């Protein structure tokens, strides 16, 4: 995957009522991780207005080159909350995160409160090292997981974890087997709280896992994928896509 072949769209003020008026971006669909269990299988971004926007970015009708995108990020005011990728993931080659992307991105968001999420496996190539580098240098990359076991392993590797939970989950908070706290996203628990108010995905105690309830028109597919992965990981039938190494 060449960075020059991708498009990145920046909305300096989001109109999404859940995010609030923060800056958000969208990346070409080809950035999506091959290890994402929701790829064409319950992804919230694969429906509604966001899908239409995402499709235009992927086709090149909207968005900018990576160079122009970085230039636009540098123009955002200091301390601005920025969510990278309301749709898309980190550029990669067969699941191996682009080193050039990560290093240039980190340099371009140092003045911001920048965060994102990834489904890329930490077991491939330099992924673990690059993810640690980003998080240590101000670009919060939350590792998306689908079970408490995977979230615990992610935290043990020194990285922030989020978990996608079944849409009918009724708990507001609970603990993982390793004693980490799981907290359901405040914007999903309130009609008035936004990402602009919350900011937990940018910075929080490293033993707190943010849970996102499956949502969107394909949430039944997402629920099925979550339930299958949860059973398989609990039974030890599937090796986690996320790291076993301990934190440095």
Image: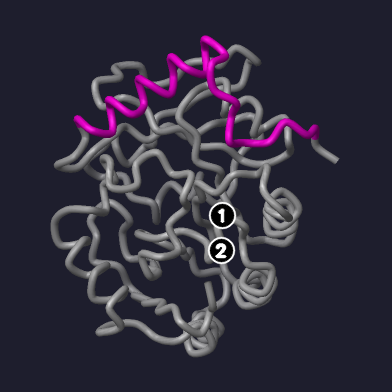
Image quadrant assignment for residue 224:
top left
Q: Under tag 1, what secondary structure? A: loop
Q: Is residue 124 left or right of residue 85?
A: right
Which stretch appears magenta? 220-246
SS type, badge 2: strand
Q: Position of residue 205 (x, y in %)?
A: 64, 36
Disc sitting over residue 95 in the figure: 1
Q: Specify how the rendered protein is coloured.
A: one colour
Residue 122 lies, with reference to residue 183, above or below; the image says below
Relative depth, front residue between 78 and 90: 90
Give the x, y percent position of residue 217. Answer: 14, 42
Identify the residue shown where x is 66% and y is 71%: 110
Q: Position of residue 212 (x, y in %)?
A: 37, 35
Q: Is residue 122 magenta?
A: no
Examine the image and state in which quarter residue 41 appears: top left
Query: CA gap, disc 1 to disc 2?
Result: 5 Å
Point 26% across, 47% down: residue: 44
**Which residue has dot 2 on it?**
92
Q: Are marks 1 and 2 in contact (CB under 8 Å)?
A: yes
Residue 240 screen position, x and y as percent: 59, 29
Residue located at (22% from left, 61% from top): 50
Decide which of 195, 8 is in the foreground and name it: 8
How crowded pointer 2 is (Cα within 10 Å; few <14, some 14-19, many 20+) is rated as many
């Amino acid at each position: 995957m060449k960075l020059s072949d991708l498009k990145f769209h920046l909305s300096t003020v989001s109109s999404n009522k859940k995010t609030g008026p923060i800056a958000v971006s969208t990346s070409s669909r080809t950035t999506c991780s091959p290890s994402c269990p929701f790829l064409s299988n319950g992804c919230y971004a694969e429906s509604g207005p966001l899908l239409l926007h995402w499709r235009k970015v992927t086709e090149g009708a909207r968005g900018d080159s990576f160079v122009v995108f970085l230039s636009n990020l540098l123009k955002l005011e200091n301390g601005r909350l920025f969510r990278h990728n309301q749709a898309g993931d980190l550029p990669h080659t067969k699941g191996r995160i682009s080193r050039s992307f990560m290093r240039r991105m980190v340099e371009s968001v140092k003045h911001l409160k920048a965060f994102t999420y990834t489904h890329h496996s930490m077991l491939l190539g330099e992924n673990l090292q690059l993810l640690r580098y980003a998080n240590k240098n101000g670009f919060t990359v939350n590792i998306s997981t689908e079970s408490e076991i995977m979230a615990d392993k992610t935290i043990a590797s020194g990285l922030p974890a989020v978990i996608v939970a079944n849409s009918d989950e009724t708990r507001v908070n609970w603990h993982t087997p390793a004693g980490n706290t799981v907290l359901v996203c405040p914007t999903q628990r309130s009609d008035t709280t936004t990402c602009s108010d919350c900011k937990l995905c940018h910075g929080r105690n490293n033993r707190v896992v943010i849970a996102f309830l499956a949502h969107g028109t394909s949430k039944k597919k997402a629920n099925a994928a979550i339930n299958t992965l949860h059973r398989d990981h609990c039974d030890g039938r599937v090796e986690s896509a996320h790291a076993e190494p301990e934190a440095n």
